[in-house]
Amino acid sequence: MGKIAVRVLDQGDGWRVTDVVCTSGPQDRPFEEVHSGVSIAIIAAGSFQYRSASGRELMTPGSLLLGNDGHLFECRHEHAAGDRCLAFHYTPEIFERLAADAGGKPGFRTPRVPPLRVLSPLIARACAGRGRPADVPWEELSIRLAAKTLQVVGGLLRNTSTAPPDAVARVTRTVRTIEQHPDARLRLGSLAREAGLSPYHFLRTFERLTGVTPHQYILRARLRAAATRLATEPAKVLDVALDCGFGDLSNFNHAFRTEFGVSPRAYRRRVSS
């Protein structure tokens, strides 16, 4: 039977950050839970189906799970086992104040934010901080994440379509393949063949379920892995680039700067200071 392990990384007046590891799989029966407070959870690893009053979405690494206070929700692991999330919890009063300051509305109308470039620096910083939680300014990070999420949600179109279970299963397999081998040469054609779809239908289905194209998803998975290593390991930038699937340092530097706004070396100095 699957279990959930929760570790509190930090907490304060009206907020809390937890590292949540779930080992549930297809054999485990899902059950309804209730969001106690407002939550923004970064999916760090694994994938699952999330259903709430705001809708139903496939949650994948790099995306944000959004929860409203008092709303029922359900998580299903129909096609693969296990996931890990960094959950930022806010009391309704604190989040309403943050929303007012950020110029947004306190309630989420969508259950998910896909892996977007504008959120990459915050997501990478949070994921890198799991191993050294005492070194991370979690309160500042929780405020910045809430504000940026509210801004992003305001520009998202709500996905009201329901994908067939078979499509979810195919994309879940692809996501797990990318997660396990982010450094491999993963071409659209080979991923489509593995999913049993034509390249056109695979591209359309993948983007519909994850919110980004396969190329964007693979690139951000590699960059998140690189950012985590830069923040937690003394390895050379070149070695990190090659290990994470980039063919040369120039390409890696350009992609990293585009995603995070700074060079890999500057990023390492920033998170280490």
Image (cartoon, helix red, strand yellow):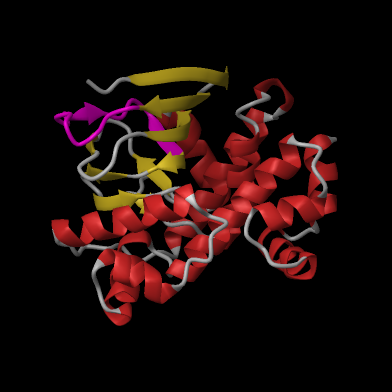
Q: Report whether 232 appears left or right of 62.
A: right
In this orientation, which residue lies closer to the viewer: 29 or 271? Answer: 29
- What secondary structure predominates along the stretch shown in magenta? loop
Q: Position of residue 1 (x, y in %)?
A: 22, 20
Q: Residue at x 56, y 51 (%)?
A: 148
Q: Quadrant of residue 271?
A: top right
Residue 210 vertical placement versus 98 (above, below): below
Residue 52 vertical placement versus 218 (above, below): above
Q: Residue at x 28, y 52 (%)?
A: 57
Residue 27 highlighted magenta (yes or no): yes
Residue 227 vertical placement versus 163 (above, below): above
Bounds of the magenta span?
23-41
Q: Report whether 163 appears left or right of 59.
A: left
Q: Position of residue 156 (x, y in %)?
A: 40, 64
Q: Position of residue 32 (x, y in %)?
A: 17, 30
Q: Residue at x 49, y 70 (%)?
A: 215
Q: Position of residue 260 (x, y in %)?
A: 69, 57
In this orientation, which residue lies closer to the viewer: 179 or 35? Answer: 179
Q: Residue at x 44, y 38 (%)?
A: 41
Location of the C terminus by quadrant is top right
Q: Report whether 140 appears left or right of 197.
A: right
